[in-house]
Image (tube, helix red, strand yellow):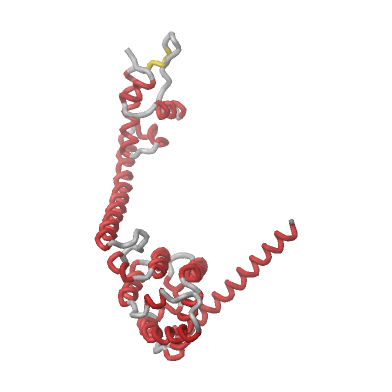
C-alpha cells in the first residue's frame, strides 16, 4: 500500500506544492502511477522526503542536499557552518529582545535608536529622528558620546521644538542667545562635531548629504535659523585647537561644492526632460 501526494504531504507535515517542487529539483524521484492515473508513493519516497525535511529543518540549503546526503565529511562541514550561522542569528535575536525589553521598560517610541531608550522621553522627536540616522553612520563609541550629549540636553530644547514657523526676529534672536552657551560647551568638549563626516563608518559624501537633508526635513526653517544664529555667535570664541577650525572650514567647503554640483545636475536633468518633451 502506498500514499497519494496529499497523504504523503500530510504524513511528512509538508505541502503538495513542496513535494512537486522537490520533484522539479530532482531531489525526490517521481512515483509510479496507478491504473487510475494517480501517483502512488512508496516507502522509499517517504524515507527520502523525511530525510529532505530533516535537512531543511536544520537549515541545509536545497542546493546542498545532494552533496551532503551520503558524504559524512561534507555533512560535518555543513553542520559546523550551520552552527556558526545559528550562533550569529541567536546573538542578533537576543540583542533584539534586549532592545524590545528596554523600549517597553522606558515606554520609548519604537523607532528610538539603539541605546537611547532610557533617555528617549527627554528627547524631542526631531532629535530622536536624527539619532536614528546617526546610529547608521557611526560606530558604538561615537554613538555613546552622542548619547552623553543628548542626556545633558538643554533647558531650552523644548522651546526650540515648539518655536513657530513664523517666529519673529526678536523671538529668534532671544532664543539663539539662550541656546548659545550650551552649544559652545558641547562643541568645545566634542569638537569633532564641527566636521562630523570624519568619524563616519561608510560613504562620507552620502552621509553628509543624508544629515543635511534630514535636518531640513526634521527641523523648521525658524529652528534652523535659530541654531545657525547661535553657532555664528559662538564660533569665533570656541576654545578649540586650530586644526578643528580648519576641519570645519574644509567640511563646509566640501558640502557647498557638493550641493552646487547636485543643483547643477538637477537643473541639467530638468533641461534634458524639457528638451525631450
Q: Quadrant of residue 46?
A: top left
- Nearest the viewer among 13 and 44 is 13
Q: Quadrant of residue 188?
A: bottom left
The N terminus is located in which quarter? top left
Q: Is residue 20 in view from this perspective?
A: yes
Q: Residue at x 47, y 71 (%)?
A: 215
Q: Residue at x 70, y 59 (%)?
A: 273
Q: In this rendering, is residue 208 above or below 33?
A: below
Q: Residue at x 46, y 68 (%)?
A: 218
Q: Position of residue 163 (x, y in %)?
A: 44, 76
Q: Position of residue 2 (x, y in %)?
A: 34, 15
Q: In this rendering, is residue 69 above or below 191?
A: above
Q: Residue at x 46, y 88 (%)?
A: 233
Q: Position of residue 149 (x, y in %)?
A: 34, 76
The C terminus is located in which quarter? bottom right
- Nearest the viewer among 136 and 168 is 168
Q: In this rendering, is residue 21 above or below 156?
A: above
Q: Position of residue 189 (x, y in %)?
A: 35, 82
Q: Is residue 231 in view from this perspective?
A: no
Q: How many marks?
A: 0
Amino acid at each position: 500500500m502506498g500514499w497519494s501526494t496529499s497523504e504523503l504531504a500530510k504524513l511528512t507535515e509538508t505541502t503538495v506544492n513542496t513535494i512537486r517542487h522537490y520533484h522539479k529539483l530532482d531531489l525526490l524521484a517521481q512515483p509510479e502511477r496507478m491504473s487510475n492515473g494517480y501517483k502512488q508513493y512508496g516507502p522509499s519516497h517517504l524515507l527520502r522526503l523525511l530525510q529532505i525535511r530533516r535537512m531543511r529543518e536544520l537549515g541545509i540549503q536545497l542546493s546542498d542536499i545532494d552533496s551532503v546526503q551520503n558524504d559524512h565529511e561534507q555533512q560535518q562541514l555543513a553542520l559546523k557552518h550551520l552552527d556558526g550561522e545559528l550562533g550569529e542569528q541567536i546573538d542578533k535575536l537576543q540583542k533584539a529582545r534586549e532592545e524590545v525589553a528596554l523600549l517597553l521598560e522606558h515606554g520609548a517610541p519604537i523607532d528610538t535608536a539603539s541605546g537611547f531608550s532610557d533617555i528617549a522621553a527627554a528627547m524631542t522627536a526631531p532629535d530622536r529622528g536624527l539619532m536614528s540616522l546617526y546610529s547608521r553612520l557611526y560606530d558604538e563609541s561615537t554613538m555613546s558620546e552622542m548619547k552623553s550629549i543628548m542626556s545633558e540636553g538643554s533647558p531650552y530644547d523644548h522651546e526650540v521644538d515648539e518655536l513657530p514657523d513664523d517666529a519673529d526676529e526678536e523671538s529668534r534672536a532671544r532664543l539663539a542667545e539662550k541656546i548659545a552657551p550650551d552649544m559652545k560647551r558641547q562643541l568645545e568638549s566634542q569638537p569633532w562635531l564641527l566636521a562630523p563626516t570624519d568619524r563616519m563608518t561608510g560613504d562620507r559624501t552620502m552621509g553628509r548629504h543624508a544629515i543635511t537633508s534630514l535636518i531640513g526635513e526634521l527641523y523648521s526653517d525658524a529652528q534652523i535659523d535659530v541654531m545657525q544664529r547661535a553657532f555664528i555667535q559662538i564660533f569665533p570664541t570656541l576654545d578649540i585647537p586650530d586644526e578643528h577650525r580648519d576641519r570645519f572650514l574644509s567640511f563646509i567647503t566640501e558640502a557647498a561644492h557638493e550641493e552646487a554640483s547636485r543643483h547643477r545636475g538637477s537643473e541639467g536633468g530638468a533641461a534634458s526632460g524639457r528638451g525631450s518633451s
